[in-house]
Amino acid sequence: MNRTKQIQELLDEKNLDDSFVIGFYGGGNFGDELLFEVLQHLFYARKYTRVSYLYQHPSGYQRHHNNLGYKPVDAARKWDILRAIFTRKRLVIGGGGLWGLDVNLNIFLMSFMLFISRILLGKEVYLLGVGYYNSTNKLGRVSAWLAGKSANQILARDDESYKNFSHLNRFTYLSDDIAFTLNEVKEDVSKELAAFEENVCRIDEPTVMISLRRFKAGRGDGYVHAVESWLNAHPNTRVILALMEPRENDPVGFAQLKSWQRQRGNAVVIDFDYNPLVLYRFFKTYHNKLAYIGPQFHVQLVAHLAGVKLMPLVYDNKVAELLRKLQYDNPLKLENISPEHIKQFVGSKGSA
């Protein structure tokens, strides 16, 4: 039988103040910024004051977050990172499907750093709401071994991750993704929400939000072609075309969205230039008018939590595990999507 523990239960039993929080924050990816936004509010609600966090571009922090008084550590300043590791008592990995399809050298280096910090420096290490998937490669498995052996406790966000981490560390618990606690965050983003609503115009009729995602080696080409064919065949359906990162991070994707916009008179294009809580509040406000199509793990989760009709798309084990947890039957593999699938989804009623 799986042992379970949610992040609030861990925070009830263990004070995680005096921590260096590590994630891929500051790169502009919606999911990473959402995880950090939620986690810092969970810490703030506990009145933690001694928290540092790794951030790729601290000068752009306020683009996506309000300052809660915690200390950024620039990911480009290696000595500052070492100083944070040495001075903080605890290292916290704040969510994400790190050990999966998208594993890279940075994740290996982070995992190795955790191992050294625990074994040689005696630091406490906590992995919160993390994912370790069978779809990863050899580098990912080695990285997960290092991270798993380093941790005092692991909160695995789904069954597959729980099974994999349990083989490495007996203090592994089945949990949820950190973003499942979104509703507990009470931050006032009303001004940002009003600006967002002005950008997308009034939602007074059924509207489909469609997002793009960068994939390695053109893995998303079939999805792009299916969306384009559906858009061309349904010129009267109102759409929001979204990039879930800033436009400068993916100029090719943004150009694709603008190209689609020019071909129709009822489309708006947005990129990720707002607090991630804004999208959740926007979805909640207009859930009965909106439908969402897109491959991103955390946008699918936010749409579901807000009650928006969701087309369940899978490109990796981590998304399959999420949709299984959310009880979506027969999710569609991204490479198999067709314009007809989109037509059937948009024309259906209720949740997918």
Image (cartoon, helix red, strand yellow):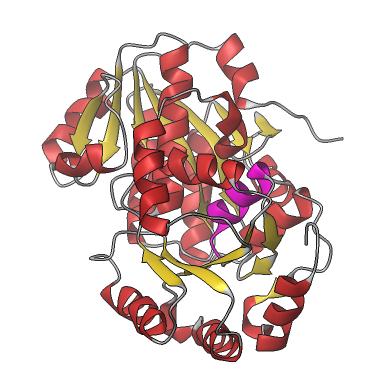
Whether residue 171 sits left or right of residue 251 in the image: it is right
Where's the C terminus, which quadrant?
A: bottom right
Residue 241 in the image: above or below residue 5: below
The answer to which of 283 and 69 lies nearer the viewer is 283
Kindly tell me whether residue 16 is visible in this rendering.
no
Residue 226 position within the rendered picture, expressed as x and y whole percent measured from the top left? 59, 87
Q: Quadrant of the N terminus?
A: top right
Q: Position of residue 46 (x, y in %)?
A: 47, 11
Start-end of magenta stretch: 295-306
Task: Residue 234: tell me if it is visible.
Answer: yes
Q: Main secondary structure of the magenta part?
A: helix
Q: Is residue 229 above or below residue 134?
A: below
Q: Position of residue 25 (x, y in %)?
A: 33, 44
Which residue occupies 42% across, 58% down?
Answer: 200
**Where on the picture, by quarter, is residue 348?**
bottom right
- Residue 246 lies in the magenta-colored region: no
Residue 251: give x, y in percent of width and height: 26, 74
Horizontal arrangement in the rendering, residue 158 relative to residue 216 (left or right): right
Left or right of residue 72: residue 295: right
Q: In which quarter of the view is residue 316 placed?
A: bottom right
Magenta includes 296?
yes
| Residue at the spot 33% in from the left edge and 51% down from the top edge | 109
Based on the displayed image, in which of its 4 quarters is residue 8 positioned? Answer: top right
Check the image and report above or below for 55 versus 224: above
